[in-house]
Amino acid sequence: MQCCNQLAKLIISVNLCKTMQELDKKFYKIGDVSEILGIPESTLRYWETQFTIIKPKRNKKNIRYYTPNDIETISKVYYLVKEKGLKLDAAQAQIRHNRDGVDKRFDAIEQLKGIKQQLIAFQCALDEIFPDIPAAR
């Protein structure tokens, strides 16, 4: 049961990577981005004021429209702030001074999450097939 709970948590974070690959529209409203990334709209608005790299397009009615590249950029900010635990100033400095390094680390982490998801799924399958054999943990 524990491995299935781990799998469920990991699937949520890995779904972001899959969703990023499946973005098929040219523009998304803030509500769509909030749903895709699991980030409140208020946080997206605040990060827009704090990070110069987050610049959604706006129409005449001042409605924000995010591109798939904007969404990927926001997911990198999320990685730095929420997953890595950096303060906003530190995350901004990381992006400003080491953009390539942040991109490479983010991509590597996303790939590792996918591999971890597969391994946990295998462990869950083995636990179901052989329920009486204690798992080596």
Image (cartoon, rainbow, N blue to C red):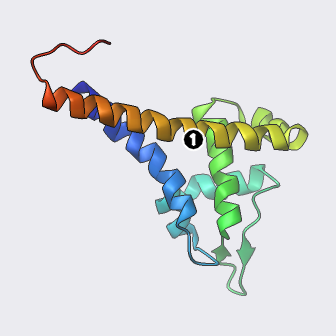
Q: Residue furthest right?
A: 97
User: Residue at position x 41%, y 38% from top?
Assistant: 117
- x, y percent for residue 34: 52, 60
User: Residue at position x 76%, y 49% from top?
Assistant: 50
Q: How many marks?
A: 1
Query: Which quadrant is home to the C terminus?
Result: top left
Seen in the picture, residue 54 relative to 9 is either above or below; the reply is below
User: Residue at position x 57%, y 41% from top?
Assistant: 111
**The residue tagged with tag 1: helix, strand or loop?**
helix
- x, y percent for residue 49: 75, 55
Mark yes or no: residue 38 visible: no
- x, y percent for residue 77: 68, 45
To which quarter of the image does residue 63 belong? bottom right
Q: Which of 118 and 1 is in front in this view?
A: 118
To which quarter of the image does residue 112 belong? top right
Indicate left or right for 132 with 78 as reference. Answer: left
Query: Which quadrant is home to the N terminus?
Result: top left
Graded by Cα atoms within 10 Å as few (under 14), some (14 to 19) or many (20 or more), the crowding at tag 1 reads: some
User: Residue at position x 86%, y 38% from top?
Assistant: 98
Question: Which residue position holds label 1?
Answer: 111
Mark yes or no: residue 72 visible: yes
Q: Which residue lies furthest to the bottom in this view?
A: 60
Amino acid on which the number 1 mark rests in the picture: Gln
- x, y percent for residue 32: 51, 68
Q: Which of 76 and 112 is in front in this view?
A: 112
Indicate left or right for 97 with 6 as reference. Answer: right
